[in-house]
Image (cartoon, rainbow, N blue to C red):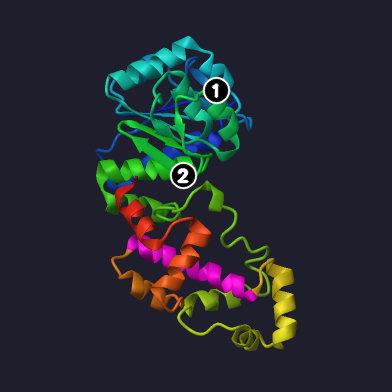
């Protein structure tokens, strides 16, 4: 059984995201563990959004293989609760895998489980977390981290990434990919928290130039100059450049590079193609040019992203 520890004013997606991953995994692996919400005070527990979730008591933790600690505004009351901290500590000592989502890392740190270990949490909590728990080696730019049997993840939706990683460890990469497909998600996100909300954040991806962007994505190996794109859109190059930038918030050349980066990153992570071949098929031309683009966008070269994707660490 997989437990998800919740509390008043927890962040709903911190709990429902991982729960959905584990629920879908069970469709592919019938003997996979089920999911149970757990709280110090059993019964209806109100999330910060007002939705109530029914939770079992701490006593129902017998037989747990994994405990995921949610985060949220209510985490301050949790780290002040000795009973909760002792509960999480005992589970860890008994060999149960302990994971946290977002500010749930505060609970693990307060219980002493992160002392001397690398961990992560939501980027906006960095300064506060470091000041409270200087003994933890915080890495604020990671989506999730694993140190032995202790896992931590970044803000909110990163709990889904963490849960997919757990599914992959327990049931294999194929199952994790099937679950991600059902959730309409990338099997594995790359880079760190700092690069999110920066890649492909076009203001109107489904507007007038939506079909053009879709066409570009399918023809990344072609010369995609402003003139080529303008001709495709039926506009003069000058008019096209102005209209495209005004509508999408990106210049045509930047939009093309972002699309190339997105597709190249996915191929680097999920395929065995040579880096040179990926660079060629996504329009970078050569591996060195693609390497420089990756370092600018993701802070690391393609080879590092590939190693991370294959090893989770």
| Helix, strand or loop status at disc 2 | loop
Point 27% across, 24% down: residue: 95
- Tell me where residue 112 appears, x and y as whole percent: 41, 19
Quadrant the N terminus occupies: top left
Examine the structure image and report whether residue 169 is included in the region drawn in magenta.
no
Which of the numbered marks, if any, corresponds to residue 143? 2
Res 20 seen here: no
* Left or right: 106 in relation to 247: left
Point 43% across, 66% down: residue: 291
1 or 2: tag closer to the N-terminus: 1
The picture places residue 159, in percent across and down from the top left corner, at 46, 40
Left or right of 103 in this view: 150: left
Give the crowd class for mark 1: few <14, some 14-19, many >=20 residues within 10 Å. Answer: few
- Vertical position of residue 179 compared to residue 281: above or below: above
> Callout 1: helix, strand or loop?
helix
Residues shaded magenta: 252-270
Mark 1–mark 2 contact, CB under 8 Å? no
Query: In front here: 162 or 105?
Result: 105
284 vs 236, nearest the viewer? 284
Q: Which mark is residue 132?
A: 1
Q: Is residue 4 visible?
A: yes
Does 292 sit above or below residue 19?
A: below
Q: Main secondary structure of the magenta part?
A: helix
State yes or no: residue 256 in magenta: yes
Residue located at (28% from left, 22% from top): 63
Does residue 47 appear to the left or right of 174 in the view shown?
right
């Amino acid at each position: 059984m997989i437990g998800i520890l919740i509390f008043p004013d927890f962040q709903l997606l911190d709990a429902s995201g991982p729960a959905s991953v584990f629920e879908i995994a069970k469709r592919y692996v019938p003997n996979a563990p089920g999911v149970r919400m757990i709280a110090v005070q059993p019964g209806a527990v109100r999330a910060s959004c007002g939705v109530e979730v029914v939770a079992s008591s701490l006593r129902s933790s017998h037989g747990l293989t994994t405990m995921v600690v949610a985060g949220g505004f209510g985490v301050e009351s949790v780290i002040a609760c000795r009973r909760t901290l002792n509960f999480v500590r005992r589970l860890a000592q008994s060999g149960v895998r302990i994971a946290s989502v977002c500010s749930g890392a505060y609970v693990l740190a307060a219980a002493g489980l992160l002392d001397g270990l690398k961990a992560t949490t939501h980027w906006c909590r960095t300064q506060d977390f470091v000041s409270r728990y200087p003994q933890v080696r915080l890495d604020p730019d990671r989506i999730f981290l694993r140190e032995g049997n202790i896992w931590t993840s970044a803000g909110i939706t990163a709990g889904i990434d963490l849960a997919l990683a757990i599914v992959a460890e327990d049931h294999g990469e194929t199952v994790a990919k099937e679950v991600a497909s059902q959730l309409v998600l990338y099997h594995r996100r790359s880079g760190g928290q700092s690069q999110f909300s920066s890649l492909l954040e076009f203001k109107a991806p489904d507007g007038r130039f939506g079909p053009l962007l879709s066409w570009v994505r399918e023809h990344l190996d072609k010369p995609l100059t402003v003139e080529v794109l303008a001709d495709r859109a039926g506009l003069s190059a000058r008019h096209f450049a102005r209209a495209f930038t005004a509508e999408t918030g990106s210049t045509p050349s930047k939009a093309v590079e972002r699309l190339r980066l997105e597709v190249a990153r996915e191929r680097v992570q999920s395929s065995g193609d040579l880096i040179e071949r990926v660079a060629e098929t996504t329009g970078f031309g050569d591996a060195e040019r693609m390497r420089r683009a990756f370092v600018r966008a993701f802070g690391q070269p393609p080879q590092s992203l590939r190693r991370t994707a294959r090893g989770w660490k």
